[in-house]
């Protein structure tokens, strides 16, 4: 491919981005993996990772160049709300790596905690290490495979986790086999008696109702953290909903530790809700019925 053609191809990729890049954006990496187009760029003091399908691209991960520890997106802050339900997890499973913001933060907060990360795309693992400071270690393990395959195998070997984070989400797509009742039952099997599930899901589409009734069918009542027209995070503690004063106590304990990441109890606590704001008659998603991306056709938000 000639240099001029390469530039034309890159320009076409940039002009397809849903959150338009400014003229001062600097592309530092792009490639087409087996699963997606991958773009890393810098603008407005941030380094961002974007995935694209169907000629659309949205930000998956962003870091502040001046303070890489600070969380940029609301969904990552909401996922960390799981610590208000279990403030000292000893073993963590994360499905979906992105730029590695969540495992990197958890490894800094809890250096002795074992963190297993599952990411299907080896190219994403490489990009997270090269551009976003993600580093596997003695306690942080990366598994390059399908999340459901990993979870099924872990269940067969009686693995258990204090915290499971499902983050196989980008702005327009969740793999359909990671949304069904059968999959969530496999996830539930891996949680300890006081374990916590955190799931990054859609907040604005027809899929919202189907996802909600499916999670409810498997886990019962859960905390529904939602930033309007952006992401929704489901939090569930296996031994039941905690009283708000207990959540507040855990938040107080963690406040000093979480401050370097740019958020705390004042922002996060008001988002904890148990309101069932979905249609209870929506059909449960199963391995036989999971047209998630068709149902998500009205989706309007990004990974913010």
Image (spheres, rainbow, N blue to C red):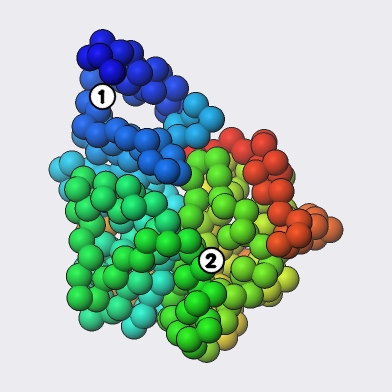
Decide: few, some or many residues near mark 2? Use Cα within 10 Å; few <14, some 14-19, many ≥20: some
- Mark 1 → mark 2, Cα distance in angstroms: 36 Å
Residue at the (39%, 23%) spot, across then down: 13
Number of numbered discs visible in the structure rendering: 2
Left or right of residue 203: residue 266: left
For the residue labelled by badge 2, is the local secondary structure a helix, a strand or a loop?
Answer: helix
Q: Position of residue 15 (x, y in %)?
A: 40, 18
Q: Closest to the observer: 272 or 152?
A: 152
Residues at discs 1 and 2 in contact (Cβ within 8 Å): no
Left or right of residue 27: residue 236: right
Q: Which quadrant of the structure image shows residue 66?
A: top left
For the residue labelled by badge 1, is the local secondary structure a helix, a strand or a loop?
Answer: loop
Q: Which quadrant of the structure image shows residue 228?
A: top right
Of mark 1 and mark 2, the one earlier in the sequence is 1
Residue at the (42%, 26%) spot, across then down: 17
Q: Closest to the observer: 181 or 224?
A: 181
Residue at the (40%, 58%) spot, across then down: 119
Q: Is label 1 or label 2 in front?
A: 2
Residue 205 visible in rendering: no
Decide: few, some or many residues near mark 1? Use Cα within 10 Å; few <14, some 14-19, many ≥20: some
Note whether 289 is above or below 304 in the view shown: below
Q: Which residue is mark 1?
A: 25
Left or right of residue 239: residue 68: left
Residue at the (76%, 56%) spot, across then down: 289
Q: Residue furthest top?
A: 4
Q: Which residue is mark 2?
A: 148
Q: Position of residue 171 (x, y in %)?
A: 50, 41
Q: Position of residue 227 (x, y in %)?
A: 52, 48
Q: Position of residue 82 (x, y in %)?
A: 44, 70
């Amino acid at each position: 491919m000639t240099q001029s053609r390469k530039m034309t191809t890159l320009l076409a990729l940039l002009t397809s981005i849903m959150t338009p890049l400014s003229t001062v954006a600097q592309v530092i990496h792009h490639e087409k993996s087996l699963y997606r187009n991958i773009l890393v760029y810098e603008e407005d003091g941030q380094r961002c990772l974007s995935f694209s399908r169907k000629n659309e691209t949205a930000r998956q991960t962003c870091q502040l160049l001046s303070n890489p520890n600070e969380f940029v997106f609301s969904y990552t802050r909401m996922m960390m709300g799981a610590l208000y339900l279990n403030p000292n997890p000893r073993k963590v499973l994360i499905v979906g790596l992105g730029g590695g913001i969540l495992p990197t933060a958890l490894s800094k907060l809890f250096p002795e905690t074992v963190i297993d990360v599952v990411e299907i795309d080896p190219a994403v693992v490489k990009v997270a290490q090269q551009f976003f400071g993600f580093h596997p270690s003695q306690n942080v393990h990366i598994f390059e495979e399908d999340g459901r395959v990993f979870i099924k195998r872990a269940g067969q070997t009686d693995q258990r986790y204090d915290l499971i984070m499902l983050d196989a989400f980008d702005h327009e797509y969740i793999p359909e086999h990671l949304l069904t009742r059968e999959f969530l039952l496999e996830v539930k099997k891996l949680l300890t008696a006081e374990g916590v599930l955190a799931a990054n899901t859609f907040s604005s589409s027809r899929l919202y109702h189907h996802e909600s009734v499916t999670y409810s069918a498997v886990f019962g009542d859960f905390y529904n953290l939602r930033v309007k027209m952006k992401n929704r995070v489901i939090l569930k503690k296996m031994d039941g909903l905690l009283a708000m004063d207990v959540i507040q106590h855990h938040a107080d304990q963690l406040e000093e530790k979480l401050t370097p990441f740019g958020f705390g109890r004042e922002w996060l606590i008001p988002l904890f809700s148990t309101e069932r704001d979905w249609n209870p008659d929506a059909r449960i998603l199963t391995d036989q019925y999971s047209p998630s991306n068709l149902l998500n056709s009205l989706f309007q938000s990004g990974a913010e």
